[in-house]
Amino acid sequence: MNYLSEAVVWLNDPLNWTNPGGLLDRLGEHLQISFWAVLLGCLIGWPVGIWLGHRGRGGSAVITFANLTLALPTLALLTILPLTPLGFGKPPVVAALAVFAVPPLLSNAYTGLRSVDPEVRDAAKGMGLSGSQVLFRVELPLAVPYLAAGLRTAAVQVVATTTLATFVNGGGLGEIISAGFGLGISVGGNQIVAGGIFVVLLALVVEGLLALVQRLVTPRALRAAKRRRPTAAAPAG
């Protein structure tokens, strides 16, 4: 059996989209989980990264935290959190995915603030701007491309990883794949492949949209100076 061609046929069946628990329902769950996880990651990672970058301290701590977080097995965290008061369902999934969203958000925010030319910062202070004014009027506007890059990376990672939510009854597109395995490879192989293809396409769409957003928020002068996307460099201690 050619599972790829069968997967295309499965995706072209309108009932697989509109039936209860079909692709549209699971897509909505997937996007909802991903949105809240990335938002929670932003509420944690951005303020900490911006504050540390503005202060010029904590670079080693940022690196250590990012490395420790990336070393955590995703599935292990997803299975441990449901044993807490969060219980099963979407809350532990959102919390677990937020943990993996924080490192790129935090490190890019820190790097963006530290990448500001010290002469620009000193000139702003020489004009009488206070520390908070330097942050909001000078440093943050120049760091926006880095913040967008961190958001782009975190969102794509979360969208791809949300597929594992099915293991803790969290919903999402992983349910399509899990249901296919429940039918057996010979019967549900097309559904398994179709679910995998859909997740890949969704991640690519998110990547493309946020790449466009990143380009739009990057000033033309910076766009010309930096031909490639800003990424989190190793911050100084």
Image (cartoon, grey):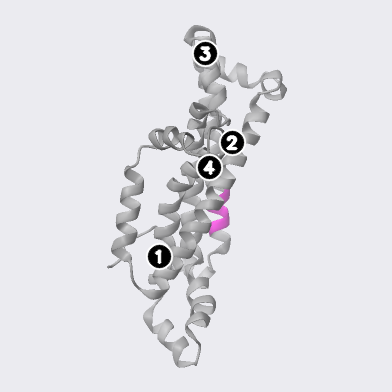
Q: Amino acid at mark 1?
A: Tyr
Report the Cα–Cα distance between label 1 and label 3. 45 Å
Mark yes or no: residue 170 visible.
Answer: yes
Report the Cα–Cα distance between label 4 and label 3. 25 Å
Residue drawn where x is 58% and y is 48% of the image: 209
Q: Amino acid at mark 4?
A: Val
Q: Amino acid at mark 2?
A: His
> Quick one: label 3, few (<14), some, or many (20+) residues within 10 Å?
few
Residue drawn where x is 53% and y is 82% of the image: 133
**Residue 54's x, y, as percent?**
42, 74
Label 4 SS: helix
Report the side of 114 relative to 33 (left or right): left
Query: Which region is colored magenta?
Result: 209-214
Label 4 sits on residue: 94
**Residue 214's x, y, as percent?**
53, 58
Name the mark nearer the viewer: 4 or 2: 4
Report the Cα–Cα distance between label 4 and label 1. 24 Å
Upstream in the sequence, badge 1 or badge 3? Answer: 1
Upstream in the sequence, badge 4 or badge 2? Answer: 2
- Give residue 182's mark: 3
Name the mark nearer the viewer: 4 or 1: 4
Report the side of 30 relative to 164 (left or right): right
Upstream in the sequence, badge 4 or badge 1? Answer: 4
Label 3 SS: helix
**Number of marks in picture:** 4
Q: Amino acid at mark 3?
A: Gly
> Magenta segment, principal secondary structure?
helix
Label 2 sits on residue: 30
Residue drawn where x is 53% and y is 35% of the image: 87
Q: Are marks 4 and 2 in contact (CB under 8 Å)?
A: no
> Quick one: label 2, few (<14), some, or many (20+) residues within 10 Å?
many
